[in-house]
Image: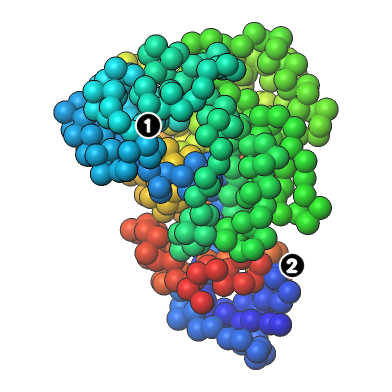
Amino acid sequence: MSLILRNVEVEGRAGLDVRIEAGRIAAVGECLPRARDEIDGRGGALIPGLWDHHIHILALAARDASLDLSDVDDPGELARRIAGATAARPTGRWLRAIGWHEAQMGDLDRATLDRLAPDQPVRVQHQTGALWALNSRALDALPAGDDPAGLDRAAGHLWRGDAWLRAKLGSDPPPLAPLGARLAAMGVTGLTDASVTTDATAAARLAGAHRVGDLPQRLCLMSGGPLAAKDDGAYAVGPVKVLLDDADLIDLDDFIQRMATARASGRAVAVHCVTAAELALTLAAFATAGARPGDRIEHGSVIPADAIPTLRDLGLTVVSQPAFVRERGDRYLRETDPADRGDLYRLASLRAAGVPLAASSDAPYAAPDPWAGIAAARDRRTAGGRALGPAEALPARAALELYLGSASCPGGKARRLSAGAMADLVLLDGPLRRVLSAPSAEAVRMTLIGGRAVHGA
Ligand SMILES: [Zn+2]
């Protein structure tokens, strides 16, 4: 079966045709012979599908079934939202809320939540995803016995306890098809899931959703522990994810040992680094253990200038989240010493220094829309309109390319529309230059994965 997209713009050349056969690009040229199926591109740009290099798929799907508090900016409003949402539920039914941050809306603990919601089990996730606040009803539903170290029942706080929580609650998995469709509509054709908690069960669920087409995107899965590949290639096994905790940094020797374990299974290492201290420890560990292609720094939220040559020399890829500048920038500006603001979510200085750079959403902790990320990388404006690190801005074209690397080499060369390449493609509703003058997912007219239309058929 063959398909031709006629009259598209490819890499700046207008009026080209692209033929797709057996899921791959067969030819790019002018006036290609007729095929069984033909699509008129109407002069729009045809670009490689976008890859979100750091996302949390199951958490994002769960988010859609949750009360979102991220726009709340005072404790009174927080109380009203939680009380309102619980009152609307039958007794005993869990309320899952997300997006809490104490700097915006005050502290939450067991006693506070009990006042707001005495009758329903409630769990509220911190914006970082690392902490849950639980009320008494929720704690009662989680019988004691094998409490993890991160659980403080008196305070009602559970720190990094998602796997335990899931095991206790059993799973009531939200559907993945709506998310797959939403991402396809934004031109996203590949996802690297960066969840440290991914285990065989979670991986099987994602593989199953991929096989039946609910989640049509190509998948690459990180995990904290061992993860076996699937025979049918439903997902690729990505790097081992290492989470650091600034308040309790692991010992350098332990860190190097974890890297050795990853190497022994043939996997790269991806380290969560959101503070300068985490980055310093990580660079020391890579310098000792040796870095290899595919090793990554996740977030790189704070990168002091003197760390940049080390990042480059080690060949580490920084996987950034440009949209955090917009979504969280006002808080960063409040909380960061002015002298350190230039170190926040660097882009242009990393690129100029030759540090491999890729972009991602970290959804659900920011919106999954890569076009919002491209706009934020270009504008470097907070939601409140303030400039954050304007010198780190990238031209929209360069920002787009941060989403065009491959899963195994996210900061490498952008994938290209050449014969033999996978037909993971996005047809835009105009020339690329025009679309990038106001980056928006609205410009996505059609998305193909392996030559099959997954959006805009
Ligand atoms: Zn993440």
Determine whether, in the image, residue 197 is placed left or right of residue 150. right
Using the image as rendered, state which of residue 439 and residue 353 is in the foreground.
Answer: 439
| Residue type at tag 1 | Pro
Relative vertical location of residue 61 with respect to residue 292 in this rendering, above or below? below
Residue 263, quarter of the rendered image? top right
Q: Nearer the viewer, residue 24 or 16?
A: 24
Decide: few, some or many residues near mark 1? Use Cα within 10 Å; few <14, some 14-19, many ≥20. many
Q: Is residue 329 left or right of residue 16?
A: left
For image coordinates 56% across by 37% down, the residue present is: 170
Residue wearing tag 1: 121
Select label 2 or label 1 by which is in front: 1
Q: How is the image coloured?
A: rainbow
How many other residues sit within 10 Å of disc 2, few (<14), some (14-19) or many (≥20)? few
Q: Which residue is located at x 67 percent, y 76 percent?
A: 20
Report if residue 95 is visible in the image.
no
**According to the image, label 2 marks what residue?**
420
Displayed quadrant of residue 164? top right
Residue 57 place in picture, x, y as percent: 53, 46
Question: What count of labels does the image hold?
Answer: 2
Q: Classify the position of the N terminus by image quarter.
A: bottom right
Q: Position of residue 455 (x, y in %)?
A: 50, 69
Residue 97 image position (x, y, % from top left): 36, 36
Q: Secondary structure at mark 1?
A: loop
As measured in the structure, the alpha-carbon distance from the residue carrying label 2 to the one carrying label 1 is 54 Å
Secondary structure under badge 2?
loop
Amino acid bearing label 2: Gly
Residue 171 place in picture, x, y as percent: 55, 41
Picture disc at residue 155: none
Residue 207, can we see it?
yes
Residue at figure coordinates x 30%, y 31% from the top left: 119
Image quarter of residue 186: bottom left
